[in-house]
Amino acid sequence: MVRITGESIKNIPWQDKPAGYRYPVWRYTDNPVITRDDLFMANSIFNSAVVPYRGGFAGVFRADKMSRDHTLVTGMSADGIHWDLDEKVIFRGYDPRLCLIEGKYYLSWVNLTPHGTTIGIARTEDFISWEQLEDACYPVARNGVLFPRKIGGEYCLLIRPCDKGHTPYGDIFLSRSKDLTYWGRHRFVMSPVKNWEMTKVGAGPTPIETSEGWLMFYHGVLTSCNGFTYSMGAALLDLDEPWKVLHRADSFLLAPHELYECVGDVPNVVFPCAALADADTGRIAIYYGAADTTVAMAFTTADEVVDYIKRHDLISR
């Protein structure tokens, strides 16, 4: 049995796997859980982050306005499915991730500057007051994802260096910092390998610590004659040296299939940004952006997803 290192989330959103369903990740039948109608003046609400908070759940949500400005807002929920979103903008930018480190909640996101995108870092204790720290990189980068604890006495951040365009540079790297101000000791993590992810890969939710390694969900992008297709994959990273990939599935876990994933502002997108993991049951609830328009959910367990990764392992070949 694969053990999750972390907290017990007794009210984790959950729906049992459909009878006869053979794949390791299954969708919530009432998707999408958040739409543009859930916030005034929102054109779309999609790639967003969620954490357990005071017996319920808190989140930071990408809400692109009707002006098409990229903004981040907060939200609260008792069950992780039905959300009350706040109209107040906390930061400009997009694609947030959240994690709890040593009693404080840390937010990373794609911060917008006149010179390109950086990885913004901020922290809070109550989701009301925020302390913005130094950006974690020089422009240009995206997909900055913090690990939920220090490793070897250092904060660790997955990142995808890129340029000012939409696609070039498709590899995941790791950066380290002792103080969340100065970042360095960069290490390569992984590149696109298979066709479904051949254009680029980027880290998704906060990595989940398990007895088999850090479980990293990520997105991979295929460029076809009809444009980009974003899908979700998974890999296991070494617990002590997380730039080392131990196992990696050769095929996606979830790809655009349902109407809300295939039709929207950007068609054919499954973009994972958050995952809740219950240490008691091994259940995992994944939040993902669907077609850059809505927030949807999917479910798996640590046993199922790790078994799938190992049975379809790229590394052991």
Image (spheres, helix red, strand yellow):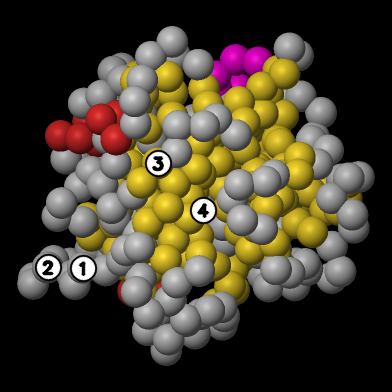
Query: On the picture, is 140 further left or further right than 179?
Result: left
Per the image, the residue denoted by label 2 is 18
Q: Amino acid at mark 2?
A: Pro
Which residue is at the front of the view, 312 or 235? Answer: 235
Q: Secondary structure at mark 4?
A: loop
Q: Residue at x 29, y 41 (%)?
A: 34
| Snapshot quadrant of residue 153 | bottom right
Measure the C-alpha gap from mark 3 to mark 1: 23 Å
Q: Amino acid at mark 3?
A: Leu
Q: Are marks 3 and 2 in contact (CB under 8 Å)?
A: no
The circle on residue 85 is: 3
**Residue 307 visible in image:** no
Which residue is at the front of the view, 255 or 291? Answer: 291
Measure the C-alpha gap from mark 1 to mark 4: 20 Å
Q: Residue at x 50, y 60 (%)?
A: 51
| Snapshot quadrant of residue 170 | top right
Measure the C-alpha gap from mark 2 to mark 4: 24 Å
Q: Nearer the viewer, mark 3 or mark 4?
A: 3
Q: Are marks 2 and 4 in contact (CB under 8 Å)?
A: no
Tag 1: Cα neighbours inside 10 Å, few (<14), some, or many (≥20)?
some
Per the image, the residue denoted by label 1 is 15
